[in-house]
Image (spheres, helix red, strand yellow):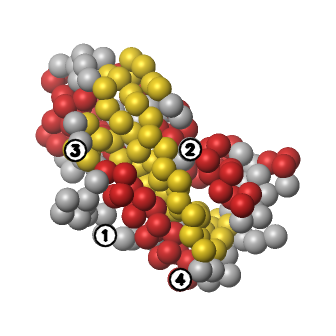
Amino acid sequence: MPELILASASPRRRELLAQIGVDFRCCAVDIDESVHPGEAAEDYVERLAREKAEACQRLYPEAVVLGSDTSVVVAGRILGKPVDEEDAVRMLMMLSGRRHQVMTAVAVVAGRQCSVETVVTEVAFVELDEARCRAYWRTGEPCDKAGAYGIQGLGAVLVQEIRGSYSAVVGLPLMQTATLLQRYEVPVWQQS
């Protein structure tokens, strides 16, 4: 049975992977997350997921490595993690009363093989005002979240509707992840 390495320091991804009964250890990697000129959002998240997995695999060449990346996309614009309060308020106001997409890519690398799957979920936000955005920022929750919100926490009250995978919005699409892992003979809960 191959060892699985999660190429992430995200507590949300760790929780989600543990939720489906997968045995793994973590290896946080630092890669350049800049968007390349003209790069489409889906290509961006797939590239980052793959680069995270490949960077970690260089440290653990015998392991199966899972990398993932999540981006919030509104009107074709990729929203990363906010750099400060003003950036978070700007992002949240862009999402206010609108639909946006959350794109999460999962890459599994083993040896010379790499499989990537991307899940796109549509999320609709309630109307927000600046005061509510600033109050949400002060909770500390938006600091490390793409698009400046966390659907699994207090940010849930900002979400009017979701179409697609909830776990993908949190950071790891579980059904697709399980399918990829089984392809690489990594046991998932009682299916092993």
Which image quarter: residue 110? bottom right
* Type of amino acid under label 4: Arg
- Which one is in front, 85 or 94? 94
The quadrant of the picture occupied by the N terminus is bottom right
Q: Mark 4 — residue?
A: 58
In this view, the mark in front (3 or 4): 3
Earlier-in-chain disc, 3 versus 2 = 3
Q: CA distance from mark 3 to mark 2?
A: 22 Å
Answer whether residue 74 is visible to the viewer in this image: yes
- 65 relative position to 181: left or right: left
Q: Secondary structure at mark 4?
A: helix
If you read the primary sequence from the N terminus, does the residue marked by circle 2 or circle 4 appear first? 4
Left or right side of 3 for 27: left
14 with respect to 190 (left or right): left
N-terminal-most mark, 1 or 2: 1
Query: Disc number at residue 77?
Result: 3
What residue would you read off at disc 1? 32
* Label 1: element kind: loop
Pointer 2 residue:
173
Amino acid bearing label 3? Arg
Indicate which label's residue lies in the foreground, 3 or 1.
3
Amino acid type, callout 2: Pro
